Amino acid sequence: MNPTENIDKLMDESRQGEAFYISDNEPVTDTYVKRFYIESYGCAMNFSDSEIVASILSDCSYVPTKDIEHAHLILLNTCSIREKAEDTIRQRLKVINKLKYRKPDTMVGILGCMAERLKQSLLEEEKLVDLVVGPDAYRDLPGLINRVEDGSKGINVLLSREETYADISPIRLESNGVTAFISIMRGCDNMCSFCVVPFTRGRERSRDPFTIIAEATHLFEKGFREVTLLGQNVDSYKWQHPDTNELFSFANLLELVAQVHPDLRVRFSTSHPKDITDAVLHVIAKYENICDYIHLPVQSGNSRILSMMNRTYDRDWYMNRIMAIRTILPEATVSSDIITGFCSETDEEHLDTLSLMSWADFSMSYMFMYSERPGTLAARKYKDDIPDEVKKSRLSEIVALQNDIARAHNARDIGKTFKVLIEGDSRKSNDEFKGRTSQNKMVVFPKEPGFKPGDYVHVYIESSNSATLKGHIVKP
Ligand code: SAH
Ligand code: SF4
Ligand code: F3S
């Protein structure tokens, strides 16, 4: 087979949603075909968007490479959520600029939230960047690349009220072949005062449920066994059929995806405490394949701070939601996001966060120091007045407490047996598999003949630490 035929074949496979990489040592003899390299930062939505970008680029003869040195086009899909996230990208650009100095024909593009936030100024500040493309403008990439090839810069940062990329079949880039993300909505209509996302991602819009179900079905047929439905606030998913006017809520969507196949696990992220309904909890309870795990970011345990954050719930409301989860889903675990050192937060208010964490018994938390973002409500209205040392010491208290809670949480699983979906080899050893329980806990166990990634096994838990459970396969 000549290299061109090889590429055509790989391209055809890619259209069915498979990742495809041409060996980097193999010369691309067809001058029409070029290689792109993409790095993704930030949340799962960005990683999912990179797979949409890969699909759009494959339609204009770009194939992915894992080796930046071989790329004709280098893309960074960026995040703006905290100042540090943007600093990381600037550092990365310095390295890429050196590469571009050596190979001036390489095209460099910034995608995602930082492109949207900084717009034209990014092209002015970072002279070697050729392309700046916001999250709703990826369909324009082929046209923008042409413009750069013609010697101009390419920029499109228009946000859309309709774009959901519903018809695009993502190319799974870093896939383990078992778990995959499916975007179900874009943007966010909440105005949490600290958050840049409504500015970088635009208005909330939901994707046609029939395309979501088709994607989940297709993934299952390809051997995938777990899908995670993604949105900034999945509980506000809402889609109306244009002909019948039938309304689909998140509870309806979840049920439809669960019905794709009993062996397809369904997860979702992120839930919002103000919007998560008992109807959703009852759907989770009804289907064994919808995982017993809810990521329900609290942000703070203090009602005054929550009100300043414009989260539109208070401590009691959050506790009430946790109690509903415990009643309807007694086996479920809950995890959280926490921001420490928000404007004017006192020591007592910080203690409220610690006490709520213990009470809620979070299996895991993502914990951050407040980082002021230009243009947000908090940046305009409040002073970022908690000194860095105080933010740091509060964060380390929160991290230490979360470790203790997680260690105790996992210790309670010793002696129990869980159904685990095998995801692949464990990080430390080829003799061990890793997989997750329905409650989203990572389990490591010795391989046994006859089992492979994508299989379900029952694992008896013998030991644990704050991050992982360890055990061995048993008969169900
Ligand atoms: N849509 C999700 C969160 C998306 S951003 C939700 O509403 O829960 C992910 C997390 O980043 C947030 O939950 C928050 O904890 C954190 N975050 C967002 N903006 C931040 C900021 N300015 N400083 C520090 N952390 C922030
Ligand atoms: Fe940001 Fe709030 Fe929207 Fe989450 S819900 S993305 S924190 S504005
Ligand atoms: Fe970052 Fe944008 Fe996600 S700011 S967290 S990549 S929506």
Image (cartoon, rainbow, N blue to C red):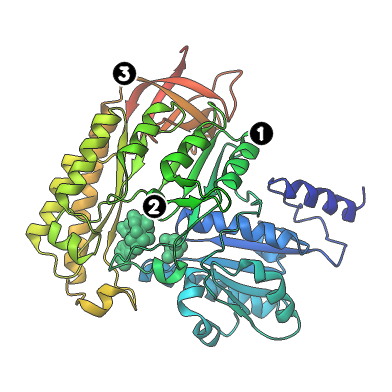
**Mark 1 and mark 3: span between their CA atoms?**
35 Å
| 332 relative to 55 in the view: left or right | left
Q: Residues within 10 Å of mark 2 (few under 14, many from 20)?
A: many
**Mark found first going from the N terminus, 3 or 2:** 2
The residue most toward the front is 244
| 138 relative to 30 in the view: left or right | left
Q: Is residue 196 above or below residue 224?
A: below
Locate residue 161, reporting x and y percent. Answer: 51, 67
Q: Name the mark on residue 236.
A: 2
Q: Secondary structure at mark 2?
A: helix
Name the amino acid type tagged 2.
Ser
Name the residue that disc number 3 marks. Answer: 415
What residue appears at the point 86 percent right and 67 percent down from the top-left corner?
31
**Mark found first going from the N terminus, 1 or 3:** 1
Name the amino acid type tagged 1.
Glu
Q: Name the mark on residue 78.
A: none
